Image: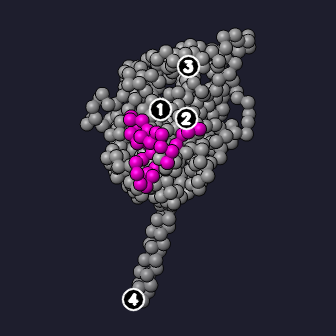
């Protein structure tokens, strides 16, 4: 591993987990099934969540660090409990090992993924019986890895992905303020955008049942004009999300060379102030998103080509973009923590939209799309490492299963049957 990365993580470790602990902070080892839970302190957000989770198959797992311990609050429709568990170097080293194997092209570290499963998920298992959807609120350290890659059993090829649809949330407070849920009819209105003439991006959006914006038509102004008319927006473009003050999504400038140019070749407009102004004019900076009106939009999918190949992001980096879209009115956001092979992105994106079109909630649609990819016999086994499919995550609401509009069809059918019955009855009377 790179020396700077080791120094960085050791600094985080030393700052977050002081070795000196009070006698009252002793806890059971993380992942120990015997870890003793204590009832969590009642709060408005917890009570509100429990009310929303009632009669659902969803559970919320809220992780936090403090006083030398890892706290896991598990909230279901029936109960809320907090597990207090000792931290240690095993957690940190396992996160580093798993993150490295995912983002640096190394062989997937199943042992590290299994250790993290035992530490982060196993204490909660008794409360997860019958649950199929988990909403993860990750801590600073656990937010470095996607939970979908955790391994329940090293003797099989299964991941947590196979057992649960997983989404992420910024906080419990964010979950108790849901937006308006569109009907499955409204969710058929999709806008797919590919601002630059890249065959892979154009192929990606053309296989989505949607209205399409490509090339010069996919300018920032074009996006702003059209975005509010659609429930789902898919963006296949350059983006940088790991630099809080500079994070942006790139659109076509209309004329000239795209501001990002070739990300591997550096900025071709360096030293040219006019070109830099045009470049900024074609970028939607994350800090400016709250000024947009996206109240009719329920989901934004960003399939990014990173402007910097080294610009991998943590879940917390992506939270900033998700919060910006939520402030503008769009409560759900899907994007990737790291750059992925465009052919793989195309296959997963195509399936994702197919399942959304069929009426699946976003978390379940993303889960099924990735399982389909893993179970596709045509795809070579070497391309099925989690590094290829696990980067995409959903940040958003608790329940994204649409309101069905089919009840209107049932009323229409019943009315038609009633009309036909009346006509037949009148004819029979006339014959008499």
Q: Give whichever of 167, 415 is nearer the camera.
A: 167
- Whole-percent x and y of residue 50? 65, 39
Sequence-wise, which precedes: disc 2 or disc 4? 2
Disc nearest the viewer among 2 and 4: 2
- Which element type, helix, strand or loop, lies under badge 1? loop
Tell me the crowding category of disc 2: few under 14, some 14 to 19, or many 20 or more residues within 10 angstroms, Cα based. few
- Residue at which label 2 appears: 243
- Which element type, helix, strand or loop, lies under badge 4? helix
Which portion, as a residue range, is magenta? 245-274
- Residue at which label 1 appears: 311
- Which element type, helix, strand or loop, lies under badge 2? loop
- Residue at which label 3 appears: 8
- Whole-percent x and y of residue 319? 57, 38
CB atoms of marks 2 and 1 within 8 Å: yes
| Quarter occupied by the N terminus | top left
Q: Give whichever of 307, 116 is nearer the camera.
A: 307
Q: Residue at x 65, y 34 (%)?
A: 79
């Amino acid at each position: 591993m790179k020396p700077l990365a080791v120094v960085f993580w050791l600094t985080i470790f030393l700052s977050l987990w002081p070795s000196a602990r009070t006698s009252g902070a002793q806890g059971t080892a993380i992942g120990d099934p015997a870890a003793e839970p204590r009832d969590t302190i009642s709060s408005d957000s917890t009570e509100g969540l429990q009310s929303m989770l009632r009669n659902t198959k969803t559970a919320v797992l809220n992780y936090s660090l403090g006083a030398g311990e890892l706290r896991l609050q598990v909230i279901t429709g029936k109960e809320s409990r907090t597990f207090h568990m000792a931290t240690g170097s095993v957690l940190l080293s396992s996160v580093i090992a798993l993150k490295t194997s995912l983002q640096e092209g190394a062989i997937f570290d199943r042992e590290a993924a299994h250790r993290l499963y035992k530490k982060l998920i196993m204490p909660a298992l008794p409360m997860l019986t019958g649950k199929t959807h988990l909403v993860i609120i990750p801590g600073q350290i656990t937010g470095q890895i996607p939970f979908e890659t955790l391994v329940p059993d090293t003797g099989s090829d299964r991941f947590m992905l196979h057992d649960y649809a997983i989404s992420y949330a910024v906080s419990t407070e964010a979950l108790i303020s849901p937006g308006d849920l569109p009907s499955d009819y409204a969710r058929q209105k999709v806008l797919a955008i590919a601002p630059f003439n890249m065959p892979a991006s154009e192929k990606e959006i053309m296989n989505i049942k949607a209205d399409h914006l490509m090339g010069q038509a996919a300018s920032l102004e074009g996006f702003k004009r059209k975005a509010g008319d659609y429930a789902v927006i898919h963006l296949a473009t350059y983006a940088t999300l790991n630099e809080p003050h500079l994070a942006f999504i790139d659109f076509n400038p209309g004329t000239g060379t795209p501001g990002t140019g070739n990300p591997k070749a550096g900025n071709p407009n360096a030293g040219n102030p006019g070109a830099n102004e045009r470049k900024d004019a074609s970028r939607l900076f994350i800090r400016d998103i709250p000024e947009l009106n996206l109240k009719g939009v329920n989901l934004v999918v960003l399939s990014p080509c990173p402007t910097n190949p080294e610009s991998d992001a943590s879940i917390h980096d992506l939270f900033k973009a998700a919060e910006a879209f939520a402030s503008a009115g769009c409560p759900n956001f899907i994007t990737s923590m790291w750059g992925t092979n465009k052919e793989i992105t195309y296959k997963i994106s195509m399936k994702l939209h197919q399942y959304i079109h069929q009426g699946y909630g976003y978390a379940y649609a993303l889960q099924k799309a990735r399982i389909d990819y893993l179970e596709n016999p045509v795809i070579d086994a070497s391309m099925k490492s989690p590094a290829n499919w696990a980067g995409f995550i959903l940040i958003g609401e608790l329940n994204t299963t649409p309101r069905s509009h089919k009840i209107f069809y049932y009323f229409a059918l019943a009315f038609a049957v009633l009309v036909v019955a009346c006509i037949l009855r009148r004819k029979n009377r006339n014959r008499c």
